[in-house]
Image: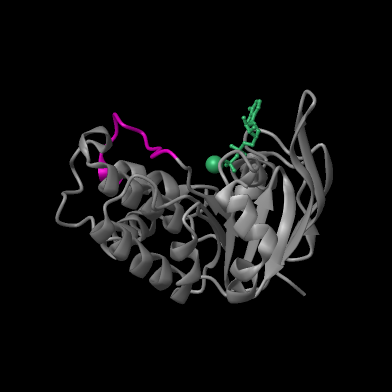
Amino acid sequence: MALLEVEDVSKAFGSLKAVDGVSFKVEAGEIFGVAGPNGSGKSTLFNVITGIPFGPDRGRVKLGGVEIQGKSGNEIARLGLARTFQRETSFDGLTVFENALMGAGYGKPGRAESEVRERAAEALEFVGLTSVGFGRLAGELSVFDRKCLMLATAIAMEPRVLLLDEPASSLTKPEIETSIGLIRRTAERGITIVLIEHVLTFLMSLSQHLMVLNQGRVLAAGEPKTVIADERVVEAYLGT
Ligand code: ADP
Ligand code: MG
């Protein structure tokens, strides 16, 4: 059984079908890539899977065989689904450490405070934020460090599946290289990853399976090399 199963999921905004009958399966332990031109429905797909801020209009989403569509975002997160956002999102008025604490303590009311602190610190060390300083305000960090903080906070939640929405956007080339290594090591921790990226080369080096969306629909899916050679994919990216 696949860890994450998305079946015929749709979401419309008025007459715009942002996600239109999308189905795919993600196996435990893999990095599953989602590509597509701007506006093809990638972020909306993550929204409807996580239920934040809205679930799908129709279709089913299963995590470990359990249907999660229609559940609240909090409940879905507690079941083991975490995400990062396309724009760097953190509690800017809180410190780096306080942000990571929010992740480590999330949905685990019985957890000892010492353990919550340990998890938060470990996640921050893992993403390389130790040198930045745990006491710095999140709002003062660079774009790259804020992306790392968003990742650390998500990792501290110990999700089964982590959805990453364009982690490489607005990063420099060396930062992208660091980011690729970090995502690979996150997968090695046993976290299954669904990775949205507009830049195909980024996905090619990381994902075992690749799905390309266009106008809310699955244009092609399968082995990455085969998918990017698909005529329809080439066309969608060139906009011809
Ligand atoms: P992508 O992440 O692939 O760039 P999005 O999922 O953000 O695409 O958007 C898909 C389409 O849905 C776009 O046309 C976008 O304008 C529209 N859209 C996304 N979110 C909303 C919303 N909350 N209200 C209305 N339209 C939206
Ligand atoms: Mg997007």
Q: Which residue appears at 56% of the width and 51% of the height? A: 238
Asked which quadrant contains residue 184, the reply is: bottom left
Q: Which of 3 and 144 is in front in this view?
A: 144
Q: In which quarter of the image is the N terminus?
A: bottom right
State left or right for residue 216 relative to residue 200. right
Seen at 44% across and 58% down, the residue is 155
Left or right side of 140 for 43: right
Q: Residue at the location (53% across, 70% down)?
A: 207
Residue 60: where, in percent of width, then height?
A: 82, 51
Residue placed most toward the observer, 123 or 34: 34
Q: Where is residue 123 in the image (x, y as percent from the top left)?
A: 34, 60
Residue 109 position within the rendered picture, expressed as x and y whole percent measured from the top left: 52, 48
Could you tell whether 221 is left or right of 103 in the image? right
Is residue 93 in the magenta section? yes
Relative depth, front residue between 240 and 56 = 240
Q: Quadrant of ligand 2?
A: top right
Whether residue 79 can be seen here: no
The residue segment tinted magenta is: 87-97
Q: How many labels does the image show?
A: 0
Magenta stretch mostly in which secondary structure? loop
What percent of the width, then of the height, locates residue 68? 76, 50
Q: Residue furthest front?
A: 240
Q: Residue at x 53, y 50 (%)?
A: 83
Q: Is residue 195 in view from this perspective?
A: yes
59 w.r.t. 231: above or below: above
Residue 230 covered by magenta stretch: no
In the picture shown, does residue 62 fall above or below 181? above
